[in-house]
Image (tube, grey):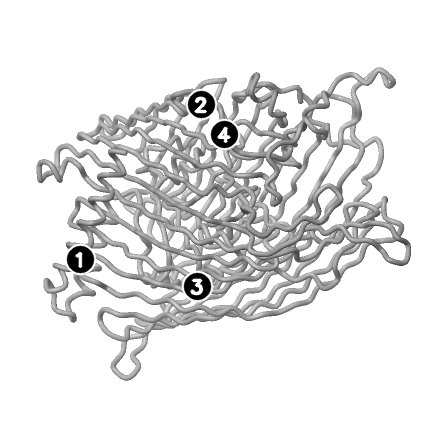
Amino acid sequence: MFLKSILTISFVSVFQFSLQAQRVQPAHQVQPVHQALDSVFIRSSPARILPEVQGTILFSGKRTNEIIPDSTGANLSANNARMAFARIPGLNVWEMDGAGTQVNIGSRGTDTHRSIEMNMRQNGYNTNSDIFGYPEDHYTPPMQAIREVQLVRGSAALQFGSQFGGMMNYVMKDADSTKILGIESEQTAGGYNFFNSYNAVGGASGKFSYYAYYDTRHGDGWRPNAAFDYHAYYANLSWRFTPKTRLSLQFSRMDYVQQIAGGQTDSQFLHNARFSDRARNFFNPEINIPALLFTSDLSPSTKLSVTAHYLNGQRNSVQFINTPNIQDTINTSLDSYNPRQVDRDYYSGFTTEARILHNYNLGGMDATLTGGVRFFDEATRRKQKGVGTIGSDFDLSLTKPYSIDLHLHTTNYAVFAENLFHVTPRFSVVPGFRYEVIDSKMSGLILNQTFPVAYTGNRNFPLFGLGLQYQVNATTQLYANASQAYRPYLYANITPADQIGVIDPNMKDSRGYTLDLGYRGTVGEWLRFDLDGFYMYYGNRIGQENLTNPSTNTAYLFTTNIGNSGDPGVEAYTDFSLWQVITGSHRSFDLRLFNSLSWNHARYSTGIINNNGKNQSLAGNRVEGVPDWIDRAGVTARSGPIKLLVQYSYVGNGYSDATNTVYTPTGVIGYVPSYHVWDASAEWSFFGHYRLSAGINNIADARYFTRRINMYPGPGILPADGRTFYVSLGLKL
């Protein structure tokens, strides 16, 4: 309550300052002063907003966030998203485990499973395995290698394509141009045999520069049967033909084998949250991404960027899949364990994006145009429900063939443009559009069907948006945005699950829009803030209805668009120096407080869904997996080379399904309680090149879970980790 009271006072101070500052600068001086102050803000803060223009991308009038992971105090060695993204209001995190092999995030009422409703990128190119048919993001780089994290919500679909949750871009660290050879290394040890080793080299000589890292991570996991072995590689070789033209060749790879502890029932979780009887379940993704990036300043007013990348990979699992109330024990009739199920996906996708940005003057008005084209071609091979071995090790071999064998292919063309008009020195307008063409095909065999599977879906549609930005004074601005978005239906939506499943041949992609209105900026060096109200409409959600064939009087499940949802909400971020407020100085010592608060009222407005063989109305129900409240707050104390952080996280309750079921005996569907988590970390930099850091995650050893699930890696309740600790020693030369 003390923290929230301070934040309320801070917001009042912000608005009072804004009104007074209207007369500080004449209009024609506002923009240069704002840019100069913003550069100071960027260097001193772990969280900031993106500039109006960066490279060939426009961010003006958009809801943006930028995080500097190295400055957050988070446990980066374990990719702890709860800490690393704490300063982004409303970002929902599925804490599947503490291994850090996978980042699972969602925003504004979207699914967190493998960031499936986020447009995930690295250095500007997509890392989702199949952005149109199977957009789970299996690729997860180590956060120690990330220079900054960029997030655009609401209006991201115009420049970046399909999404409702937003576009998140990992900008990787680059070469130190002042050195021929630079070295960075950090070794981390923690509880439950956790060990992470991050090692990087980089440098520059003449026109050539390079940066590369190797990261390895392994441990036993907080729960039994949760061991993991992770590896990540990256190399970036760059050549500057001229000071304004650069060509970069990049290669990324990530692979890991992780033992899956499985889900729990409610009674198992309450009795012992660490319980697991799934010793034979394993998951193994392998993702390779070579990329070629070209940037050039064609003239003082025109920039060009071209990115081409190829994603080649696979997703493999071998599991005894059953609800958690059924133990994985010896089958007496077989005198052995039951055979496990083997599922394998193979991805092969090529994407090219070309963007151009041009500054020009129209009737005395400064303007910036950005536009581009995108080509995407992906082939996915899906093999599922193969009968595996009765063994207990990681073994993908089969004893019987796959009962699902599908060839999936998508081709996409897109063109987009946005234009920034500086109507006055203070007021900017940014209209934009995008046009998408999608061609999806599926063929193959599902053995429990009486006929081969074939599907063709060709569709195209435009998206429109409008952004506004008003510079209230030298350091604060109002922004607003209205933008359309969409989410393509997935391969899973057009694959009949069994003999009673029928797919709607007229099924539509999910379509909707987002509205944003916000106020953000700084007050001196003691306060940074961003207060945003939004509304997101998510139409044509996909689900199943229970129907009856009138000619045969038999029931069947009909996969179709079942309804719509709306999500009004508020996202608020404040970061202020309590020490500077009290003493007027923060040079030798600083005590800063931040609060990242969001409220989401995601509800179904219309809809019908199948529930135990009967159709049930969804109107008024909460959207599944979406807590109403998320609040993350922290206190950071800094004195010279020493930095301390204490962070608090609260996530409200929710439901795991659209029918808002409270309880089922299997634990697969039900209520998800709210939870509170405390984290702490400390850093000490010494001798100029060394850093010692340590931390405790989940200090109070809270027992909680963020999600129930009816598929991998469950089914059932998936407990989050209890109390863990880590110690790191790093050097940078």
Query: What is the number of the mark on residue 18?
Result: 1
Q: Earlier in the sequence, mark 3 or mark 4?
A: 4
Which quadrant does the C terminus fall into?
top left
**Crowdedness of circle 2 by 10 Å Cα count: few (<14), some, many (20+)?**
some
The vertical placement of 330 against 493, above or below, is above
Q: Quadrant of the N terminus?
A: top left
Q: Nearer the viewer, mark 1 or mark 4?
A: 1
Q: What distance separates the C-alpha of mark 2 from that of mark 4?
A: 28 Å
Q: Which secondary structure, mark 3?
A: strand
Where residue 478 sits, quadrant-wise, is bottom left
Instruction: Work out whether mark 1 precedes mark 3 in sequence or the reverse, and give the earlier one.
Output: 1
User: What's the mark number on residue 216?
Assistant: 4
Q: Residue at x 43, y 44 (%)?
A: 91
Expressed as whole percent of the image width and height from the top left, the position of residue 489 reads: 64, 56
Residue 484 x %, y %:
49, 64
Residue wearing tag 3: 305
Quarter location, residue 628:
top left
Measured from the top left, where is residue 106 in percent x and y? 49, 45
The disc at residue 702 is 2
